Amino acid sequence: MKATELHIIAHTHWDREWYMSFEEHRFYLVRFMDQLIETLENKPDFLHFHLDGQYIIIDDYLEIRPQMRERLLRLIKSDRIQIGPFYVLQDEFLTSGEANVRNLLYGLKMCCGIGAEPLLLGYFPDAFGNIGQMPQILSGFGIRYAAFGRGINEVQYNNTVNPERINPSEIIWSSPDGSSVIGVMFSHWYNNAMQLPENTELLSKKIDDLIAAAESSSSTPFILGMNGCDHQPVQTDLPEILKKAQAMRSDIRFIISDFKDYLPKLDDYKNNFQTVIGELCSQNTKGNCRLVGTASSHIPLKQLNHKAQYILERIAEPLNALWVLCGGKGYGDQLYYSWKKLMQNHPHDSICACSDDAVAEEMKIRFKKSVQVSSAVAADAAKSIVKNIKFAGRHGLAIFCFSPFETAERIETFIDFEGEKPDNVFITDADGVVVSADIEYIGKEFTYELPENSFRVPKYVHRFKAEFVVKAHGIGWKCFEIHTEAYMPRSQAYASGSENRLTVRENGAENEIIAFRICRDGSVTLTDKRTGRQYYGLNTFENAEDNGDLYDFREKSNSTRTYSRDNPARWSLIKKNSFSAVFKINSQIEIEGTLYPIESLITITDGVDRLDITANFDNKCKNHRLRVLFPSQINTDFSLSSGQFDITKRSLLPGKLWENPENTQRMHEFFAAENGEYGLLVAARGLCEYEIMRDESRTMALTLLRSIGQIGDWGSFPTPGGQCIGSHTFEYAAVPYSGKTKYAAYRSGRNFSMPPLYAEQLKIQRGSLAPEFTAVKIESDRCEISAYKSAEDGNGAILRIYNPTEADERITVSFNKNVSSVRLTRIDEKEISDNLLVNGAVSYTVSAKKIVTFRLCLIKKYKTENKYEAFT
């Protein structure tokens, strides 16, 4: 469309850490911010500057220059420098759904905390693709616009856009639930107006080319010129340059603009925009520079991220919410700090691990800090609850469950005894029935207590490791009693719970749902006993030579892939009890002409529909990719992948332009192949890259490790740490299913990735909390939980659930009697409904692909002498 206005937005895209360390990049950030503040203060006609949509720049700068705070805030509050809405510019695919939400929630909180009006724009200039549920997330914060650089056009190396593949600059971008935003595509990248030249002739050509290119893809007369790029200094003479440009072109108005002025101008034209539904990940390109290989670079960092997110979201926050429900003060400040440390690792160049080795080393420290804080919160909240449970036994275990759905999972925990070592240890449930448990003496261990009102207490204890299956339904806890021989007759102990419910053979085992056997080549044959369908050749390892970089896998030309099935394997049964069995398989794979061992531990558990697998590999080789294969033999043309509030359906057949022989994809918790009748699901912990190959077997491949020694992109940046030399442990699982059991399989895969149980030991005490308690229980087949946490404003708790499937579901959510009201909120926790609670429950239809957030308001009146009375 013919342009009438050229909106020049001055900006910089500040990668916090990338080809240099964070501190080295910050050195230049301080110089940049000094220059920006001075320029805006001295040039009133330099009206606006866009500070990259991420608040963390302000924190990073003021930590070095605290004396500049008032000058900076003055420019921000006057809207000369526009900030927000995010805390960091995250990678959306490699961070959890909740992490994407909190990045926005806390970014807006920080902006408002300094008195600024944040820019309400989903700003993703250089994100390596965009998740399908992002329009719904943005809408849940009242944000109506998004701007992005990747996902539709074909962006080549060094951030150049293929001019033959230019798509419209404006679209309606919709999530699968129907939520939508106006999307602005940087069709000619976010640097199309960078470094406008002072020379008249050069400026004229630059402006003419910019306008012509923008007009070719714009659906409005308002075109966008982005004056900046990665770490780009301020163009201090921009007002003068634009005055000169205006004198050259009287047919178009030149404006030093901002997104707050530019975006509303698009509203009148939105009916002309084409609609794009779902994720934006370069599906309709040649597929050569999608940057999906970042999902498998520096795998140990991905595993640390998974651990940090898991402990924070699924353990610490629910335990904190339960403690607040019991009348405790909670640990909101500590959790906020933990989130900040975690999110500081979520910028795209950080979590994607396409950065200098120094970045990877600092990320490990941040992850550890987040885990340490979250673990401390979880432990203290659990101990605080346990101290107030009414318990008559001498020793016990409180098992906390964080899934509101019906759950049966295996838990491992420690049991400590002071004084004499007991000869025998037994566990009984609330009905006095002995629990089938595997209890192993570890030895005499040193530990300590830190009482609130006295000095530390060191001690030695006799430590046992207990493993057993817990069945639960709802967020809450249930207590088990621990007996020793002195408190339980030997005859009773040996008379109960000793039946063997597994059938174990020399080369495999079975429970009532699945069976497996180990083959001579070390692969596994898995049988779904409910359907009789068998899957052959599972857990076969594949190695390929990698000539790529930290961004993308590129197989070395004329190389040959090798497989563990080409070499003999050994196996043995290493553990067996009444509810589980563990086999060890020793396989070998050839890499660079040498055989290297891979050890697999295969676990089957009574009543559980999956095989849990742990693989151990000592990597001594460079420039290669290691994957584990699961031939599905399922005739399908699509894959399913759990993602952020979604199960994403992706075609195995790329678009007509596709040239890349690889079609790897990203996942969060699991991926699956299914055809309506049968399915096979592979779940993982911190392994984010998969592919379903287009071979006859529709082989499912999970990337375990990618060793590579250079960043790639615009320069030569060696990264020896990216080779990931050393010992590695990988955790994944296989779940067979049918059309009737697929939703249970999805939940099983998620429970493997994010185990919902936590244990805390307790002793005899006269507390006021019941030994079994359920805060929230949900009757649902399709829906999943994303968060159970204290509300940000301190008023009650937040329960966030979502329906990742393609059909609506009517669910029933039951609450403890200390919940006085339940109201719908937006994702930003602003209430949008009246009280929905009727007789202690809420019946609600969760639409397909919908995210639903409830605020649970709590009864405030507790008796002084017994504030836990409502729970007994």
Image (cartoon, grey):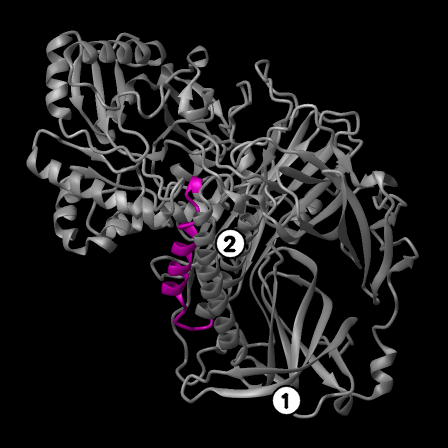
Q: Position of residue 476 (x, y in %)?
A: 57, 66
Residue at the image position 86 percent from the left and 80 percent from the top: 494
Residue, disc 2: 309
Residue 610 showing in the rendered view? no
Q: Position of residue 841 (x, y in %)?
A: 53, 56
Task: Look at the image and tell me in which quarter the N terminus lies.
Answer: top left
Residue at the image position 20 percent from the left and 46 percent from the top: 116
Give the SS element for disc 1: loop
Residue in front for this viewpoint, 444 or 88: 444
Q: Position of residue 674 (x, y in %)?
A: 73, 33
Q: Is residue 702 left or right of residue 91?
A: right
Q: Which mark is residue 283?
A: none
Identify the magenta region: 326-349
Residue in front for this viewpoint, 329 or 166: 166
Name the N-terminal-most of marks 2 and 1: 2
Residue, disc 1: 418
Was residue 690 drawn as part of the magenta stretch in this picture?
no
* Residue 89 found in image quarter: top left
Residue at the image position 30 percent from the left and 37 percent from the top: 52
